Image: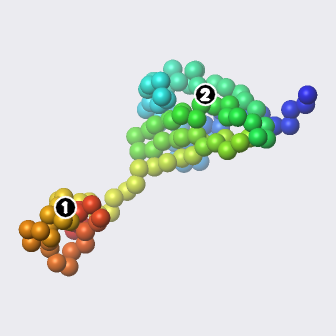
């Protein structure tokens, strides 16, 4: 039976997406799976040094719970039948930080609500 899928190397795929976002393998601080956390060097040997073939309507070849975590970013696997790839995620930059937490109900009940100031749905006031 002839394979019609695409052969991929997970390590090369990982290096490419990291480079696309200005990172290298050395920026990975740990690798996370449901089994636990792994040192990046150990994880490269165990999880990334793999060649796999994606075929239409096939099951995933790479662990779906695999996450590579850096200081302010992470990579996670996305899967649809016959395709899988890395998705790059970053921590959001905060432009407004909460200054204090006050329950919306408590604020209205005890009269502490500050008029004209913005509050999010959890009751945080913003500067």
Residue drawn where x is 59% and y is 31% of the image: 63
Looking at the image, can residue 6 be seen? no
Where residue 91 sits: x, y (%)?
41, 50
Query: Residue placed farthest to the right in the image?
Result: 1
Secondary structure beneath label 2: helix
Secondary structure beneath label 1: loop
Query: Residue placed farthest to the bottom in the image?
Result: 116
Q: Nearer the viewer, residue 62 or 57?
A: 57
Residue drawn where x is 29% and y is 64% of the image: 121
Position of 90 with respect to 84 (left or right) is left
Q: How is the image coloured?
A: rainbow
- Image quarter of residue 47: top right
* Residues at marks 1 and 2, CA–CA distance in whole angstroms: 46 Å
- Image quarter of residue 5: top right
Where residue 73 sits: x, y (%)?
45, 44
Q: Work out whether 66 lies above or below 89.
A: above
- The residue pinned by badge 1 equals 103
Where residue 65 sits: x, y (%)?
53, 34
The quadrant of the image that shows the C terminus is bottom left
The quadrant of the image that shows the N terminus is top right
Position of 70 with respect to 94 (left or right) is right
Q: Residues within 10 Å of mark 1 (few under 14, many from 20)?
A: some
Q: Work out whether 71 lies above or below 122.
A: above
What numbered label is drawn on residue 48? 2
Residue drawn where x is 37% and y is 56% of the image: 93
């Amino acid at each position: 039976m002839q394979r019609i899928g695409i052969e991929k190397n997970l390590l090369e795929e990982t290096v490419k997406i990291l480079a696309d976002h200005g990172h290298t393998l050395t920026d990975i601080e740990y690798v996370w799976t449901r089994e636990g956390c792994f040192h990046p060097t150990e994880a490269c040997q165990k999880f990334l040094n793999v060649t796999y073939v994606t075929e239409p309507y096939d099951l995933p070849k790479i662990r779906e719970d695999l996450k590579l975590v850096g200081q302010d970013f992470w990579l996670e696997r996305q899967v649809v039948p016959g395709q899988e790839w890395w998705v790059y995620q970053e921590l959001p930059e905060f432009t407004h930080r909460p200054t204090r937490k006050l329950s919306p109900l408590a604020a209205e009940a005890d009269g502490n609500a500050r008029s004209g100031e913005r509050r999010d749905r959890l009751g945080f006031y913003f500067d």
